[in-house]
Image (tube, helix red, strand yellow):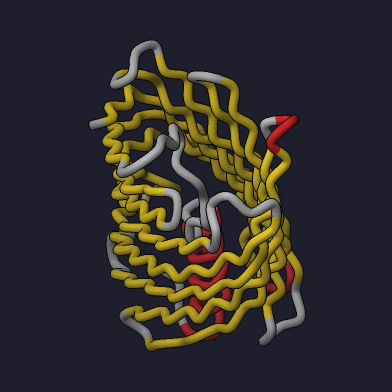
Amino acid sequence: MIRGSVLRPVLAVFLASVLSSQGAESPSSSPMPQSGNTFLLSPLAGWNRDEMTMPGPGGVTSTSQDTGPEYGLFMLYANPRVAANNMIFTTEENGAQVTGDIFFLNLYGDPAATVTWNAGAGYTWHSIDAGAEDITVSSTIAKAGLMIRWPAARLSFNPYLASAWEDVSTTHGDSSADYLLYGLSAKWQWRMVQSTARYYYQDDLDTSAHFNCYQARVSVFFTRQWGLLARFDHTENSASTDTSFTIGPAYVF
């Protein structure tokens, strides 16, 4: 049984481990953008791998690794000026059952401009059942940036700055944290294939810690309506390194 002063750092590490691979979804374009309105639905399945470092008595630390299944449902609405996506997911990590929802809304300026503005906001919610500990985490993110298009190379770039506010509720008390994110995403599209790569640097304003996050999204469509969507995430923080991969059919209507 974990008691007293040992419980708080253990909970802090556990939370960082569980949430790092399911952080707030950064703004993204449609996996298969088209003129007019696009609706996309994609059930996903894959795995999530966690490497976690746990603090112990006397400053001794231990490292554990765990790989578990992950399932999700990705939904998207997009037009040339608006992109809204929502991801519902569930996974098991280090003996805890995690269920969550990630929503993000992006707004864009002139869709024909080489350089235009971009703004967005998002919300995430996680419910973590760790047996004796029930944890609820919610966070809000706001971002602003530029959309830079290079039509000849079929490329677009989205550098942005974001601010995030996180609230954590546990059986043993509540806490909050503030973050700054410095991000860059790049998208390439050719006919029925699209790939997006994203990197952001996360700055914890409360502890002065710095972390990195890498994401990739690839979609390949075989018809105007049916294709495959794959998602890859790799996240670092002070307590753990998390990697997840999911893939599934995508339907556009």
State whether residue 65 appears in this view: no
Residue 229, compared with residue 144, is above or below; it is: above
Frontmost residue, 20 versus 62:
20
Quadrant (top left, top right, bottom left, bottom right) of the N terminus = bottom left
Residue found 57% across the figure and 75% down from its top: 9
Q: Quadrant of residue 207?
A: bottom right
State whether residue 24 appears in this view: yes
Q: Could you tell whether 41 is left or right of 157 in the image?
A: left
Residue 240, compared with residue 180, is above or below; it is: above
Frontmost residue, 202 versus 41:
41
Residue found 48% across the figure and 56% down from its top: 25
Q: Could you tell whether 99 is left or right of 34 in the image?
A: left
Residue 121, compared with residue 234, is above or below; it is: below
Expressed as whole percent of the image width and height from the top left, the position of residue 125 reads 34, 66
Frontmost residue, 2 versus 202:
202
Frontmost residue, 126 versus 219:
219
Total numbered circles: 0
Expressed as whole percent of the image width and height from the top left, the position of residue 23 reads 50, 59
Q: Could you tell whether 63 is left or right of 108 in the image?
A: right
Residue found 57% across the figure and 72% down from its top: 143
Residue that lies at the very extreme toward the left in this rendered image = 253
Q: Quadrant of residue 162?
A: bottom right
Expressed as whole percent of the image width and height from the top left, the position of residue 51 reads 61, 46
Residue that lies at the very extreme toward the front in this rendered image = 112
Expressed as whole percent of the image width and height from the top left, the position of residue 109 reads 54, 63
Quadrant (top left, top right, bottom left, bottom right) of the C terminus = top left
